[in-house]
Image: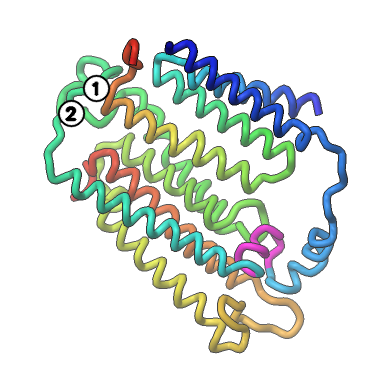
């Protein structure tokens, strides 16, 4: 019975793979009109060198606001479920692949492997995340990517060290998240007062727009994404760092 | 073209392994490897933004979350379930 189910699943995957094979193998030329327009005008229109940043923070900034809202709603739902679950104290028994000393209650959330790897990797990942976030207007990356990497760094630090710092404190992290959403709203309506419309770049110069507004939006979105994903992960892992 | 087909078939094989494996930890590691291969593919296709996100989310955060979930439940699939 079980083998039959598996073979059905594998057969389905293979058929789906065959279905998308023509798309992969096709040699038809891609439409180039939008690409050529963006290649010529993206820097002049939005001020960002990186065309991807120019699209998602310049031409389509409204979509970015929507994505941030989706993230906010999903985090809110997850956190409310987790808070209700946390009322009943769950005892940590099902530690299935840890060594004997790790079954002590003090160690019940960590294993030696995670501790050794994550505590060393955490600061480097955090630094790389901030680099990706801050240079999103020039190089590949941006607020969302950098924010996710920052969240990985915070999760690594929360797993790997016993220190309870402010960086792994869920209350501080959720406050940063709320504040950055407020700043995102303020930044998005700031263009209205400088004649460039909703989500327009308020910093107007004569020749070329400065990328400062893009950098500001990248930082705000990166802080929001990073802290919200980190707060969710830390809360899922038992909220051991919440005080 | 050869390298695309090679990486994609590797991804397919790892996906089938992740589905069929009895040990859930092995499945999670296979999923992480799928993420790394996808990131490699995105880099070859010159979409480094997507590659960064895929590597950070797929191989980083989601692996950690899955390992955590396994730690709090059961590592091995039950027989006959």
Q: Position of residue A19 (x, y in %)?
A: 70, 31
Q: Nearer the viewer, residue A116 or B18?
A: B18
Query: Where residue A9 is drawn, which disc sits there?
Result: none
Rendered position, A96 above or below A122: above
Q: Nearer the viewer, residue B13 or B57?
A: B13
Q: In which quadrant of the rendered view does residue A45 lie?
A: bottom right
Q: Position of residue A229 (x, y in %)?
A: 39, 49
Q: In which quadrant of the rendered view does residue A33 lie?
A: bottom right
x 60%, y 78%: residue:
A200
Left or right: A239 as drawn, with respect to A213 = left
x 59%, y 83%: residue:
A197
x 81%, y 65%: residue:
A37
Label 2 sits on a secondary structure element that is loop
Disc 2 + disc 1, Cβ < 8 Å: yes
In which chain is the residue bearing label 2?
A: A
Asked if residue B54 lies in the magenta stretch, the reply is no
Instruction: Give the color scheme: rainbow, by chain, secondary structure or one colour.
Output: rainbow
Q: Quadrant of the N terminus of chain A?
A: top left
In which chain is the residue bearing label 1?
A: A
Q: Nearer the viewer, residue A208 or A8?
A: A8
Q: Residues within 10 Å of mark 1 (few under 14, many from 20)?
A: many
Q: Position of residue A124 (x, y in %)?
A: 48, 41
Question: Magenta residues, as a range?
Answer: A48-58
Label 1 sits on a secondary structure element that is loop
Q: Which residue is mark 1?
A: A95
Q: Residues within 10 Å of mark 2 (few under 14, many from 20)?
A: some
Left or right: A47 as drawn, with respect to A213 = right
Q: Which residue is mark 2?
A: A92
x 35%, y 16%: residue:
B77
Q: In which quadrant of the rendered view does residue A24 lie?
A: top right
Please tell me if label 2 and label 1 are on a single chain: yes
- Give the Cα separation between the discs numbered 2 and 1: 7 Å
């Amino acid at each position: 019975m079980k083998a039959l189910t598996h073979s059905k699943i594998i057969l389905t995957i293979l058929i789906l793979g065959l279905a998308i094979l023509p798309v992969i193998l096709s040699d038809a030329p891609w439409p180039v009109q939008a690409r050529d327009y963006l290649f010529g005008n993206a820097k002049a229109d939005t001020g960002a060198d990186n065309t991807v940043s120019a699209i998602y923070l310049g031409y389509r900034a409204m979509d970015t606001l929507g994505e941030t809202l989706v993230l906010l709603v999903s985090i809110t739902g997850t956190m409310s479920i987790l808070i209700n679950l946390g009322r009943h104290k769950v005892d940590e028994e099902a530690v299935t692949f840890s060594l004997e000393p790790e079954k002590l209650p003090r160690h019940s959330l960590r294993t030696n492997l995670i501790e050794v790897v994550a505590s060393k990797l955490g600061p480097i990942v955090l630094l790389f995340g901030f680099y990706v976030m801050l240079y999103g207007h020039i190089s590949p990356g941006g607020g969302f990517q950098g924010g996710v990497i920052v969240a990985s760094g915070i999760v690594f630090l929360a797993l790997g060290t016993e220190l309870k710092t402010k960086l792994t404190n869920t209350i501080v992290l959720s406050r940063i998240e709320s504040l950055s959403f407020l700043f995102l709203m303020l930044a998005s309506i700031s263009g209205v007062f400088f004649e460039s419309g909703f989500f327009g770049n308020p910093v107007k110069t004569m020749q070329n727009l400065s990328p400062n507004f893009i950098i500001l939006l990248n930082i705000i979105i990166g802080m929001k994404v990073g802290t919200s994903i980190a707060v969710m992960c830390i809360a899922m892992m038992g909220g051991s760092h919440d005080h | 073209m050869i390298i695309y087909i090679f990486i994609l078939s590797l991804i397919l094989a790892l996906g089938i392994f992740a589905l069929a494996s009895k040990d859930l930890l092995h499945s999670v590691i296979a999923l992480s490897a799928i993420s790394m291969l996808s990131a490699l593919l995105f880099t070859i296709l010159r979409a480094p933004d997507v590659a960064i996100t895929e590597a950070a989310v797929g191989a980083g955060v989601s692996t950690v979350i899955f390992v955590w979930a396994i730690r709090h439940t059961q590592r091995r699939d039950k027989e006959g379930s």
